[in-house]
Image (cartoon, rainbow, N blue to C red):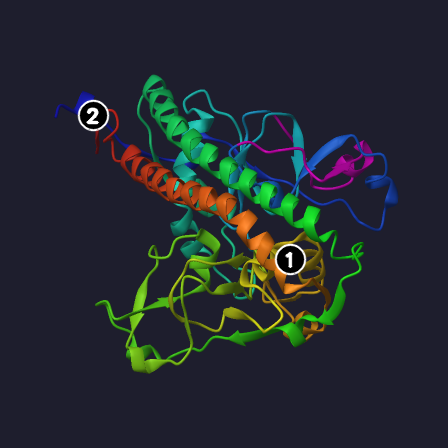
Amino acid sequence: MPASQQFTHTAIGEIFKVSSGGTPSRKKNEYFKDGQILWVKTGDLKSKFVGKPSEAISQLGLENSSAKLFPPKTVLLAMYGATIGACSILTFEAATNQACAAILPSESCDEVYLYYYLTSIRASLINMGVGGAQPNISAGLIKRLKIPLPPLAEQKQIAEILDAADSLRQKDQQLIEHYTALSQSLFLDMFGDPSSNPKEFKRSLLGDVIDIKGGSQPPKSVFKSEPSSGYVRLVQIRDYKTDKYLTYVPLEATKKFCTEDDIMIGRYGPPVFQILRGISGAYNVALMKAIPLEEMDAEFVFHLLSCTYMQNIVIGNSKRTAGQTGVNLKLLNSIEVSVPPIELQKKFATRVSSIEQQKQQAQASLAKSEDLFNSLLQRAFKGELTGRKVA
């Protein structure tokens, strides 16, 4: 292929100005009170475009801190903490805290193309993080990152292809959220809000009606590459993918197993206390299995653990250690819950089953659209979407 048909890698620092923000003193109420300047933190970097931040600062706060105003089309990248490597694009003028690297707009690079490139290398960025409890990447490291840089028109073409694939997976995700909301609505209609128990069902401690069992950690020496028993880890709970990170252990190496019908709890986070079924195999110490006892139906238990009442209590009381939140098992077992008649629970299970079947189909569709998107994402920056060759 002629040299004119190739594009090379260029250091981000040669194309963009890279900056960061700051945090006004929390001791100065006037730096935050009635603030009109939107202030973005790494927790706000949740999707391609930054949504409205949870906080704003005042002009005084901006002037008396290292916070800076950044224009629309600035790409923000989380430099440390649990969200390291997350990135989003500003669509409005905003300030940021010091944990956000701000890659300012450049005429030679499309901001959406840059966003997708940084998304494609997030795993590498996480691995580049240095430090103990708070791994971080520096602005200097970001400047040294090299990005494939075809002509601007070609960048936009690549971004459009990835946008189309991203739109498919977003629609699947929204469909899952729709079915989840329908199930929750049915749960509240039949049983009322668990926090107030308006239907006056019997109340019991969670630990008296559900047996929660932790996982085990086999020694590294027993792990193997060929299939025997799948070894389920926290990352599968997070990603809803039972085989993406699958490893194996011999059947005799652990006594802690789960089946696809079991209710599993992600013990550590973020996100902490994630509830999931549909996975099978040995499971590790980051997971717990919730086993309904005699008075409880599994479908009811799954939705009970997933409801806002339970989530707020458990997540609100999860301790943070080394950047991770963790479920307090003693607290979980001590939460008072409603115990409706088993016949009513089974009636709920029957009614919700059709919704859950549709949700499972949507999850299968999401897995396919995620695979398609990730495949295109990796091919995009090798020059395979537009026929170019990366030099």
**Residue 198 among those drawn in magenta:** no
Question: Which residue position holds label 1?
Answer: 344
Magenta part of the chain = 49-71
What element does badge 1 sit on?
helix
Residue 176 lies, in percent from the top left, at 50, 41
Q: Is residue 96 left or right of residue 202?
A: left
The image quadrant where one finds the C terminus is: top left
Residue 75 lies, in percent from the top left, at 52, 33
Question: Which residue position holds label 2?
Answer: 387
Q: Residue at x 19, y 22 (%)?
A: 5
Q: Residue furthest left?
A: 1
Q: Is residue 27 above or below residue 387?
A: below
3D distance between C-alphas at marks 1 and 2: 60 Å
| Three-letter residue code for mark 1 | Leu
What element does badge 2 sit on?
loop
- Asked whether the beta carbons under mark 1 and mark 2 sit within 8 Å of each other, the answer is no
In this orientation, does residue 81 appear?
A: no
Label 2 crowd (10 A; few <14 / some 14-19 / many >=20): few
**Residue 53 among those drawn in magenta:** yes
Q: Is residue 225 left or right of residue 347?
A: left
Label 1 crowd (10 A; few <14 / some 14-19 / many >=20): some
* Of callouts 1 and 2, the N-terminal one: 1
Q: Residue at x 34, y 21 (%)?
A: 157
Task: Look at discs 1 and 2 and give the one toward the viewer.
Answer: 1
Q: Is residue 234 left or right of residue 301?
A: left
